[in-house]
Image (cartoon, grey):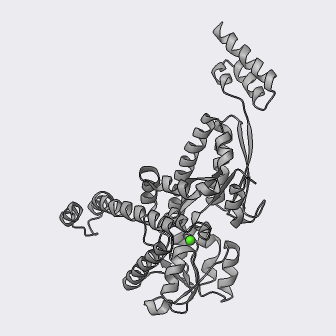
Amino acid sequence: MQKSLKWLSSSLLCSAVLIGGCNEDKKAASDGQVGQAAVPQKTYEWKMVSTWPPNFPVFQEGVDRFAKNLDIMSQGRLKIKVYAGGELVPSLQTFDAVSQGTVELGHGAAYYWAGKVPAAQFMSAVPFGMNAQGMNDWFYGGDGLTLWRELYEPFNVIPFPVGNTGVQMGGWFNKKIESVEDLKGLKMRIPGLGGKVLSKAGGTPVLLAGGEIYTSLERGNIDATEWVGPYHDKRLGLNRAAKYYYTPGWHEPGTMLELIINKAAWKSLTPDLQKMVEEVAMATNLWMHTQFDTLNLNALRELMADKNIEVLGFPPEVLAQLKLLTQEVLDEEAAKSADFKRVYENFKAFSANHDVWQTLSEISYYSANHPSMPFDIQKALKDAAQ
Ligand code: CA
């Protein structure tokens, strides 16, 4: 009796509102899955743009996966048509398109909008900042996400962390970097705060979209470039354009990618769909990071086997100097913008604690498991107590 009443109410709802999804519900009801028919049937057809090239592995793949999973989980109530960079709007207009409501959703990285929101750079990558684990901790466990939402609030944009590249590579150079002197006069494609640090070291940061990097390096218009990690760098053919490949990516130690949603569109969603978007965003964040981590080592091994290139580590004194210069850049930027200062202070305090816990947990364990890596646990405990 109860079953047939539910079926009846489902049929009435379908005939009353005549919207997508009802046929599925009738089928479900006839299959005996009557519980699902009571779900509110308002449907949404949204557009999503990104800053990535079409079919760009992991990045655009993650965006496609996000949209597809929401379609499945919402039983077709939230349909998102995905456009890669340039297909509907130019890549770097993604933020404006979402802000103005031209599209409901976007995917990119917060440092692309540094010109509009300088403090947004903390939401993507900070040289010598936190790794992927730390960034996730700051967003989901600390104040990171709240601060991020405050920064985007004036633009009617709601951000979510979706995807992390992990530690990137230091980049491709047409000469060896043996001292800080070698960075002087170096023209390098490197975005964001990392570019400002290079500038302080006497180099010239250049901004280039992904599609222009290979040709510029190969023709000698730039002397060096960073891109992502071994998997994506190899795919772009950078190993055919420069001889020296350096690690680590001091400038991007755990670059967080972002999903952005127009505020009015978000508010129009039913609470259950809002929850699905939130949870699928978190799942996609995890999925993308696992892909980067899984694909990069094989690609690096292939590059290391290539006789035409050399994979090298930056000398410790170069890294130490870049770290000092990073501190100067961050302090200068904080002096220019109250928002930057506010976010920087929160980020700095969280990072300091994160470092202590990483040392006592991850590094302590890593050393226990790899005895060749010396680690003084007593000293670490003593430092943590201070
Ligand atoms: Ca990069």
The residue that appears at 54% across and 52% down in the rendered structure is: 285
The residue that appears at 68% across and 45% down in the rendered structure is: 265
Image-based side of 24 in relation to 57, left or right:
right
- The answer to whether residue 305 is seen in the rendering is no
Splitting the image into 4 quarters, where does residue 221 fall? bottom right
* Nearer to me, 56 or 272: 272
Residue lying at the far top in this picture: please name it: 1
Image-based side of 258 in relation to 17, left or right:
left
Q: Residue 111, image x and y in percent? A: 57, 67
Splitting the image into 4 quarters, where does residue 228 fall? bottom right
The residue that appears at 71% across and 36% down in the rendered structure is: 77
Splitting the image into 4 quarters, where does residue 187 fall? bottom right
Determine whether 29 is above or below 61 in the image: above
* Nearer to me, 69 or 230: 69
* Nearer to me, 157 or 217: 157
The residue that appears at 53% across and 88% down in the rendered structure is: 203
Q: Residue 233, image x and y in percent? A: 60, 72
Determine whether 65 is above or below 123 in the image: above
Q: Residue 74, image x and y in percent? A: 66, 36
Determine whether 281 is above or below 53 in the image: above
- The answer to whether residue 263 is seen in the rendering is yes
Image-based side of 129 in relation to 18, left or right:
left
Q: Quadrant of the N terminus?
A: top right
The number of discs equals 0
Determine whether 247 is above or below 137 in the image: below
Q: Quadrant of the C terminus?
A: bottom left
Q: Residue 29, image x and y in percent? A: 70, 19
Which quadrant of the frame does ligand 1 lie within? bottom right
